[in-house]
C-alpha cells in the first residue's frame, strides 16, 4: 500500500464552519479514504466534539489545536501575522515544514492567498501568483479563467505569466493536452483592446511557452474556442461573480440541466493558489459539505500531479 | 396635428440590409406612424424596389440616394471620411444640417460612433462620448451599463462623466427618478479595486451631480441595487458580450421566460451615442425587422426627450 496523502483542512474557515467542514471531511474520507489522511486545524475541543458523531475512525485524522480564528471580514495579512495560532497560520506552518502535503480552506480568501505567498514563497522570483476558476462550456471540457482577482492591476508580463500558469494547470490537473490559451479582449484583431492587452498580445503572439490562439471575446467564454482564458484580475473577478449570479438566478427560475450544474461551485472545489511553493486550495466562503469534500479532492489532485513543481519548470523553461 | 419627427434610417447598414431594414421601417411606420416620418439613406433604386412591396404610402418617407456602402469590416473613420456618399456619411450630414431630427443605423459601429463624434461634435469640450446597453433585472426596471466599448482605456474623470451620462439617460429616457449609480468593482469597500476605480471612487463619493451609491460587484448587475452601472469600456464590452452569449445558450437549451427575453437585443433598439450633439442610435449588426423598428423607436425617444441637451446641461452643471 502506498503512503497516504496528508491533506490539511481548515475546520474554522468558511460561513458554515465547523459543521459543514467536518461533514466535508467525513465525505472526503469516505470517497478518497484509502489515499487520504486528514490533518484538521481548528479549536481542538470543537473538532473532537463534532467529529465523534460522524463515526470517523481515529486513525483517519490528526487534530492540530488552533484556538485563534481569522474572521471573514478581517484585514487579511494583518490577521494572518497577528494570529499565529489560527487555523490558517498553523496550516501554512505545517505545510512549509512538510508535515502535510497540501492545505485547503474555505476561510478568509485574502488571508489564505497572502498567507500562501508569505509563508511558502513563489516558485521563482518576480512572479505574481494568481487565482483561477472553471469555465464550463456546453461542448467539451471545462476551460479555466485567470486571474480572478488576486491582483487588481496587472502588467503585460503578468498576463503572460498567468497564461503559463493556466496552461500548466489545464495540462496537468485538467489533463487537456496542448491547451489553447486565449487573451480576453474586446475584439479578435491584434490591434484591438486597451494598452495592457495590446502589449500582452505582442508578448504572446510568437511564444513557444504555450499554445496561444489569439484574442478571445466575452461571447467566446462558453464556446469551445479556448481552454485557458487570460485576463486581468479586475475583469476576471467581475466575470466570475456575474456568472455565479447568473447560475443562481437561472436555478431560481427553475432552469436546470447538466451544463448549468457545472457552474455550481459545490462541484468545483475552489481555486488553487497558482505560483506558490506548495499545494494550497481556497474554497468558496459559503461551502457546504459537498463543496468541502471537492475542495479536498482538488487539493489531492494538485499534490499528486505536482502542480507547483510543474509551474516552476514551465516558468524556468521560458526564463 | 403636431409636426412629425423626421428620423433618418440607414437602409444599407447591418447584416440583413436592405431587407430587414425596410421591414423595420414598415413596422415603425405602422406603430409610430402619426408621429413619424422616415428619411431613408441607401442606394435609391434598391430602396424604391424594396419598399414598393411593403405598401408604405409615399408621403411617409423620403429617400436620399447613398450609392456608396461602408462595409462591416472596414476601418471605421477612414471609410467614413473617404465615402461621403455612403448612407452613414450622408445621414450625419443631414443630421448636422437639421434636415432630420435623429439618425439610426445597424451598420459599422465604429463608423457610426466615429462619424457621430466627428460630424456632430461633443456637447462640451473634453468629454468622451460612450455607448451603453440595458441590464435587465429580475425585479424592477432595466438598469443600464456604460461604457460598453467606445473606449478601451479610461481615466477616472472619464468614469465620472460616464456616470453623469448614464444618470441623465436613466432619468430622461428610462424615466427613473434619482437613478442610483454604482461603480463596477471587485469589492464593496472604498479601498477595493484597481487604481482606476479607486481614483474614480474618490471623485464620486461626495458628488451632488448624481446619486452615487458606491461600489457594486459582478453579482450586483442583476440585482436591484443600482440603475446605472459605470465601468471602463474594456470590462463593459466583455460583460455585455458574455451576457449576450448566455442569453443565446439559455434559449438553445430551451430556457425561456419574461426575464430572459429582456436580454433579447431585438427588444432593446440599440445604443445611443451619449455625449454628442445630436440623436444617434447604433443598432446591433444582426438586427432583424423588429430590432430595426425598436431602434427607430429608441431614436424617437432620444429626440423627444432632448437627451443631448439634457446631457449638456448635466455636464455644465458640474463644470
Image (cartoon, coloured by chain):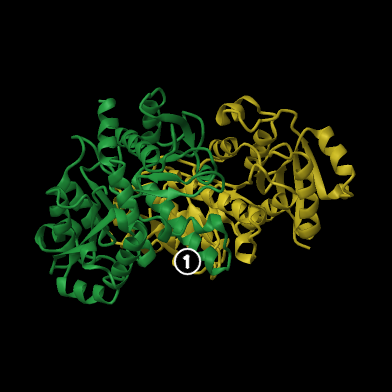
Chain colours: A yellow, B green
Residue at 88% over, 50% down: A57
Quarter-wise, where is residue A66 in the image?
top right
Which of B140/A53 is in front? B140
A163 up-or-down from A104: above or below: below
Residue B80 visible in the snapshot: yes
B169 up-or-down from B70: above or below: above
Secondary element at tag 1: loop
Residue B99 x/y as whole percent? 14, 52
Which of A244/B279 is in front? B279
Q: Residue furthest front?
A: B1
B18 up-or-down from A239: above or below: below
Residue A78 x/y as whole percent? 57, 26
Residue at 79% over, 45% down: A22
Residue A217 x/y as whole percent? 39, 59
Which of B250/A142 is in front? B250
Residue A222 visible in the snapshot: no
Q: Quadrant of the N terminus of chain A?
A: bottom right
Tell which subunit mark 1 falls on. Answer: A
- Badge 1: how crowded within 10 Å, few (<14), some, or many (20+)? some
Image-based side of B170 in relation to B64, left or right: right
Residue at 31% over, 71% down: B16
Image-based side of A294 in relation to B34, left or right: right
* Residue that numbered label 1 is attached to: A223
Image-based side of B134 in relation to A9, left or right: left
Number of marks in the rendered image: 1
Amino acid at each position: 500500500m502506498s503512503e497516504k496523502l496528508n491533506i490539511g483542512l481548515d475546520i474554522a474557515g468558511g460561513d458554515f464552519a465547523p459543521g459543514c467542514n467536518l461533514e466535508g471531511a467525513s465525505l472526503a474520507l469516505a470517497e478518497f479514504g484509502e489515499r487520504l489522511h486528514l490533518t484538521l486545524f481548528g479549536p481542538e475541543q470543537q473538532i473532537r466534539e463534532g467529529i465523534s458523531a460522524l463515526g470517523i475512525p481515529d486513525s483517519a485524522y490528526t487534530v492540530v489545536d488552533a484556538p485563534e480564528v481569522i474572521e471573514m471580514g478581517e484585514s487579511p495579512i494583518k490577521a494572518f501575522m497577528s494570529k499565529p495560532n489560527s487555523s490558517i497560520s498553523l496550516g501554512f506552518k505545517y505545510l512549509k515544514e512538510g508535515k502535510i502535503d497540501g492545505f485547503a480552506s474555505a476561510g478568509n480568501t485574502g488571508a489564505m492567498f497572502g498567507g500562501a505567498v508569505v509563508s511558502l514563497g513563489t516558485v521563482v522570483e518576480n512572479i505574481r501568483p494568481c487565482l483561477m476558476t472553471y469555465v464550463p462550456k456546453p461542448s467539451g471540457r471545462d476551460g479555466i479563467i485567470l486571474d480572478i482577482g488576486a491582483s487588481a492591476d496587472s502588467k503585460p508580463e503578468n498576463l503572460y505569466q498567468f497564461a503559463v500558469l493556466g496552461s500548466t494547470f489545464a495540462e496537468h490537473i485538467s489533463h487537456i493536452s496542448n491547451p489553447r490559451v486565449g487573451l480576453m479582449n474586446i475584439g479578435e484583431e491584434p490591434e484591438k483592446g486597451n494598452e495592457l492587452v495590446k502589449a500582452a498580445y505582442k508578448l504572446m503572439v510568437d511564444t513557444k511557452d504555450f499554445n496561444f490562439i489569439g484574442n478571445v471575446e466575452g461571447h467566446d467564454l462558453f464556446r469551445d474556442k479556448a481552454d485557458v482564458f487570460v485576463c486581468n484580475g479586475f475583469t476576471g473577478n467581475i466575470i466570475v461573480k456575474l456568472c455565479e449570479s447568473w447560475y443562481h438566478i437561472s436555478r431560481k427560475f427553475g432552469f436546470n440541466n447538466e451544463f448549468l450544474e457545472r457552474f455550481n461551485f459545490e462541484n468545483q472545489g475552489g481555486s488553487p493558489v497558482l505560483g506558490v511553493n506548495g499545494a494550497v486550495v481556497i474554497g468558496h466562503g459559503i461551502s457546504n459539505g459537498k463543496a468541502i469534500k471537492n475542495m479536498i479532492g482538488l487539493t489531492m489532485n494538485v499534490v499528486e500531479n505536482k502542480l507547483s513543481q510543474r509551474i516552476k519548470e514551465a516558468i524556468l523553461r521560458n526564463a
